[in-house]
Amino acid sequence: MTAGVGLAVQARLNGELGSWVGDGIAATLASTTVGLVLLLVVVPLLPAGRRGLDLIRTAVRTGELRWYHLAGGVCGAVFVAGQGISVGAVGVAVFTVAVVGGTAVGGLVVDRFWSGGPSGPRPITMARTAGAGVCVVAVAIAGHGAWDGSGSLALVVLPLIGGIAIAVQSGLNGRVGAVARSPWPPTLINFTVAAVSLTLALTVRVVFRGGPPGRLPTEPLLYLAGVIGIGVIAVATIAVRHIGVLVFGLASVTGQLLGAVVLDALTPGRQPSPATFTGVAITFLALVLAAQPGFRGANH
């Protein structure tokens, strides 16, 4: 739940930074770089960090880990770039509920084919599918008001894709975290891969469309999204190994929605609509369903 609140705050910070810079990718790269620099300083100083990095190197060399297990940062880059691009237009609450839908569907699939948790893959049952389906309904309702106007539909679809990416990232991080025996080395790898991915994307954008029209603000708080991301990834790396991607994703929604609606209501810009509140209520229903033992889909 704490990680969910962090995601809501991170979304608002990345959205504000994106508005200043005029480019979601450039804004996201700036905040990601802040988090990466912090991790590069702290992780090598931690005994668990050094040991975990050695274990990961050994696992890659022996084939226990494949190269794609270390690519979770690409998914993270897709998600945070979506924050910077779409939050300012659709609001944090609509963005969050859209992410929930993507995470629900992605978590369902990742849990089915991912064997990184202690209980192994979790089958796609009718109950788990129904829980994910309720979240998709919530996305359709909450995003209805944002689908007016040119290009706004794409701005709702983008966080849906970001939610799927987060589910994949959580599964990959859980696998790497199990090998490293610590959440910090996978988090460092995620930020490194994300920074490289965003740098490449920004380079392509500058080549074809020119540089960002805005500028980086001097307000230091706007760059804390990367620091918040460190905590979110670390918590996810630990949790998904025990409860699975779908249940973790839906559990974190509680914090996301509480933080998102409050932020939208108390700050300037798009305010939560009745459709958004309806979507929030339906998403809470999905949480209640997923929390029931029969909805976890664990193997017996």
Image (cartoon, rainbow, N blue to C red):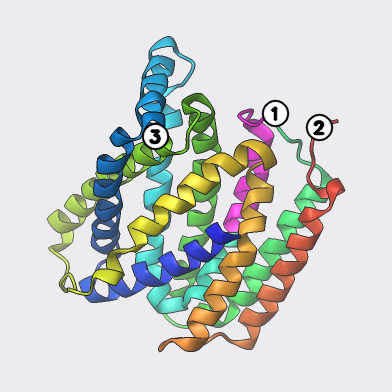
- Which residue is the site of mark 1? 120
- Residue at x 41%, y 49% (from the top left corner): 76
Q: Residues within 10 Å of mark 3 (few under 14, many from 20)?
A: many
Q: Nearer the viewer, mark 3 or mark 2?
A: 3
Residue under the point 72% across and 68% down: 284
Q: Secondary structure at mark 2?
A: loop
Cα–Cα gap, marks 3 and 2: 30 Å
Label 2 sits on residue: 299
Q: Which mark is residue 137?
A: none
Residue 102 falls inside the magenta stretch: yes
Q: Position of residue 276 (x, y in %)?
A: 61, 80
Magenta highlight range: 101-119
Mark 3 lies on residue: 185
> Residue 274 location in percent, x, y?
64, 87
Q: Against 148, is 35 above or below?
A: above
The answer for how far apart the CA atoms under marks 1 and 2 are is 8 Å
Q: Earlier in the sequence, mark 1 or mark 3?
A: 1
Identify the residue at horizontal 65%, vertical 41% (top origin): 109
- In the image, taking residue 50 as reference, residue 146 lies left or right, namely right
Whether tag 1 and tag 2 are in contact, CB under 8 A, the answer is: yes
Between residue 289 and residue 78, name the one nearer to us: 289
Q: Nearer the viewer, residue 143 or 95?
A: 95
For the C terminus, give its image quadrant: top right
Q: Is residue 283 visible?
A: yes
Q: Position of residue 249 (x, y in %)?
A: 62, 53
